[in-house]
Amino acid sequence: MVRNVASIRRFLARVSVASVLACGGSEPGNHETTTAGTAATTDPTTTTATTSTDTPTSTTTGDDPSTTAATTVDPTTGEPTGDVTGDDPSPGCVPSEVPGGTLRWALGAGALPGPGIQSVAGSPNGDTVVVGARDLYTPMADAFVHVVDAAGQSRWSDLYTGKAGLADYALGVAVDGEGFIHVLVRETILQVQGDEETTDARLVVLRYAPDGARVWRWERAHPPVMPGETFTPIGQIAVVDDDLALLEQIAGEPPRLVRLDRFGAVLSEVVFADLPPLSTGSATIGRTGVHFVGKTEGALDMWVARYSFAAEQVWSDQFATDEFPYALVGGPDGATWIAWVLSQEWYPQYTLRRYEQGGAVAFTRDLDFGDFPGTVMASGLHCDGTLLLAGGVYGVAEPKDLLSDRKDVWTARHDADGAHLWTHAQPLGQQFKNAEARRIVGAPDGDVLVIAEFAVDESTYAIWLGRVAGG
């Protein structure tokens, strides 16, 4: 599937993994029967395969008519019955047998449910999970979750159409240590066109067993909107210890962190009430708290901070720069990584900084792309806690030409000092130009999962999913 380049870039930018803090909604996605397809190797087009104090409480249900997936659960525990363990678990985070960045398999647009892939995660059994939206730019967009096995072969897929049958967007996905999949969806419950255009939506979490059976659905409660109003929350989801952490962001309100247990019960809710006014920014859920970065009002200073899961500020830093952040990662030891553009006189020049757990600056250094310049569009963590970055790199295709307008997918892994452990440029076939990674995530076994987009022609782009060796 392909879409106009401006549309896809607009979608991917508005609902990044590090969700935008600036006031405003996002236009992000469902569950369908398994689609046939096999893994592509190098050709990307080969078809081969809740609760605020004065609102109602959130609800958790064990079944829902808006999904076609069969669900068999124990009525007393809410856990699925039967064979839900999938394959044997992987041996854990281990070095790969091939160099880091080596492509293991790739899937092009023909083997994926839709163009609007929003997030990706790895499962302990070696599966890869992608979520997003099908029929992205229509009032009937549906959220999907699609799972492929360790070889890139389709395992199961589900299309979630929501209770109202309106636009539903998958915003994020998190997989726990037992392989249970948790999908964060923004579900539209009311859409009225006309003089008093009205939109009302809710954040919903869907929990799936490893075999695709739906275990429960949790909905974040909110009062209905009045005619002419719009309520379109965004958020992200992560597994923290044995629980789920949901970071909710609503226009004009401070972010809230909601913790859920494995049964969908709310454990706690906190508000990040003391964040400074930011013109734009990002947040990410780390293993030790929530990390924030953004530009202060007037876009004069960069502001960076780490908060505990109790919404207490651990440290903050502020420094003058005209540029905007392009990466934000929370390390397992409480460290915070950020990257921003220092100069764009010829090609973008990126700066990488790491803060220690207590907020001291560990280093600030130029980001090295190798012999050719590049761009940073995504960041994540390897399973051992080292930094992953991804984007695009110019000029590396044969014949090598620094002035070439061709851009290939760039991925890199960095140690605690910011030095390369490896860096890799992945061409997506010689006929394609302007390929660029949009998401990068470390899988539990040490591999790295990458979502990229590439130019099919001058006006259309398509989506690519790759699994590469982690080194």
Image (spheres, grey):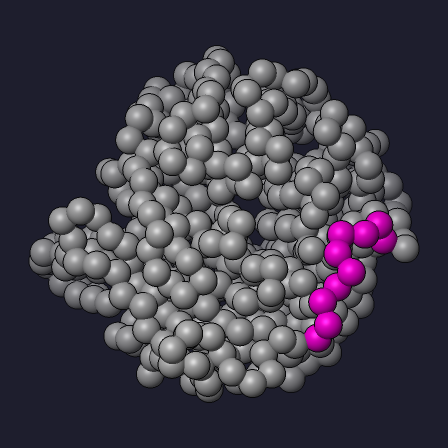
Image coordinates of residue 60 in percent, x first then y, are 32, 68
Image coordinates of residue 394 in percent, x first then y, are 74, 40
Foreground residue among 384 and 139: 384
Residue 221: tell me if it is visible: yes
- Residue 66 horizontal side relative to residue 155, left or right: left
- Residue 268 horizontal side relative to residue 45, left or right: left
**Furthest residue in direction front, as rendered:** 76
Q: Which residue is drawn at 48% across and 17% down?
A: 317
Residue 92: image quadrant is: bottom right
- Say above or below: 320 vs 115: above
Image coordinates of residue 264 in percent, x first then y, are 38, 63
Foreground residue among 150 and 233: 150
Task: Say which quadrant the N terminus sits in.
Answer: bottom right
- Chief secondary structure of the magenta span? loop
Q: Residue at x 51, y 23 (%)?
A: 323
Foreground residue among 463 and 460: 463
- Find the magenta span and give its range: 87-96
Magenta stretch: includes residue 85: no
Residue 135: tell me if it is visible: no
Q: Residue at x 45, y 62 (%)?
A: 262
